[in-house]
Image: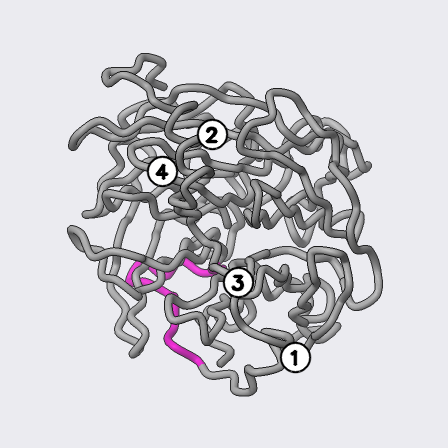
Amino acid sequence: MRLGIRCRSLVAPMLAAGLAAGALTVTGASPAGAAGSFLGGLHRISTVASTVPGNGDVNPYGTAVVESSVGRLHRGDVLVSNFNNVKNLQGTGTTIVEVAPGGRVRPFARIDANHLPGSCPGGIGPTTALAVLPGGWVVVGSLPTTDGTPATAKAGCLLVLDSRGHVRETLAGHGINGPWDMTAASFGDTTDLFVTNVLNGTVAAGGRTVHRGTVLRITLNRCGDDPPTWVDTRVIGSGFPERTDPAALVVGPTGVGLGRHGTLYVADTAANRITVIPDSLHRDRSAGIGRVISKGGHLNGPLGLAISPREDVLTVNADDGNIVETTPHGDQIAWRQLDSSGTPPGAGALFGLAVSLNQNAVYFVDDATNQLDKLR
């Protein structure tokens, strides 16, 4: 892991200027605008493409929309990370695929654990933590196992890939321990990654729930054509319930999304609730689990999370295959079923979630069918 800064860091003044001038770019979030519920205007579910690459990796997890064309990345395409290998062993996948809106699928990266530029404890297992940064840098979390079971799960790392799918850097340690999901905010050459972590004491607990899940803010600085370098790590959320699970590998804080005024929304999966961490861009200490804005109701094990064009929170359920729209005040104003396969219907099928660039659709991965689907 690189600890030095080759360019002068402008983190504080750049973020401050961005907030004051309204110039802050939030990866994965969209501006407000639509009246009424966002989901109320979406009626059709269609399959975009299979997410299974040539090596047979399955279990699509992360979903990120490409905002700018650079290298092998094309604006409007969707990157999808695969968590399992061809034998369906969790935490052993090695690939990221790029899916065009019309259905064309191309391999973006096949990551070799034996040829990494730095440390990644345990190896490779791409999770839902996936983001595309300015300059075409792609960051993906790795929570690896050797045999698909919680007993062999290791801390992993964040992998930084260039726009052609080559791993150029690894970020490990400094609180990274089972990176499970992620969102990012960028201004200029500075990016803040917001990463949930689910392996703090979970393996040792042997299936018992421990309240040690965290949210990290990891600040990176980009200098020219070099990979973004680590600047700072802060624990801004802590005490989230997490546990190992024979079917899901691990259950803990999952989706994160950044709303207005630096409010970070967290899908607290094990507690079946959505919490908010205020002032996430600037706080220098943990807010604990933050403030609970919605619990129960139509929430049923919320996993993936995205912010709608009207700043509502979209979450997909682990236990019934539904998507739920919740206002910043906690009102659940819309919901519908996205997946009905499995027993019970939709169980464990939905993870990655992303709003399309034109803000009139939602992309989501279906683990039960190994597909990228769209609700529009």
* Residue 138, image x, y percentages: 32, 44
At horizontal 49% and vertical 56% (from top left) the residue drawn is 61
Dot 2 amino acid type: Gly
The answer for how far apart the CA atoms under marks 2 and 3 are is: 41 Å
Dot 3 amino acid type: Ala
Q: Which of marks 2 and 1 is in front?
A: 1
Q: Is mark 3 on a helix, strand or loop?
A: loop
Which residues lie in the magenta part? 47-60
Pointer 3 residue: 32
Q: Which of marks 4 and 1 is in front?
A: 4
Pointer 1 residue: 340
Q: Residue furthest bottom?
A: 44
At horizontal 60% and vertical 26% (from top left) the residue drawn is 283
Pointer 2 residue: 122
Q: In front here: 311 or 324?
A: 311
The answer to whether 215 appears left or right of 366 in the picture is right
Q: Is mark 2 on a helix, strand or loop?
A: loop
- Magenta stretch contains residue 58: yes
Graded by Cα atoms within 10 Å as few (under 14), some (14 to 19) or many (20 or more), the crowding at tag 4 reads many
Pointer 4 residue: 187
The answer to whether 279 appears left or right of 6 in the picture is right
At horizontal 63% and vertical 39% (from top left) the residue drawn is 150
Specify the quadrant that holds the N terminus: top left
Q: Do the residues labelled 1 and 3 touch (CB within 8 Å)?
A: no
Graded by Cα atoms within 10 Å as few (under 14), some (14 to 19) or many (20 or more), the crowding at tag 3 reads some
- Position of residue 308 relative to residue 203, above or below, is below
The answer for how far apart the CA atoms under marks 4 and 2 are is: 32 Å
Dot 1 amino acid type: Ser
Residue 144 visible (yes or no)? no
Q: What element carries label 4?
A: strand
Q: Which of marks 1 and 3 is in front?
A: 3
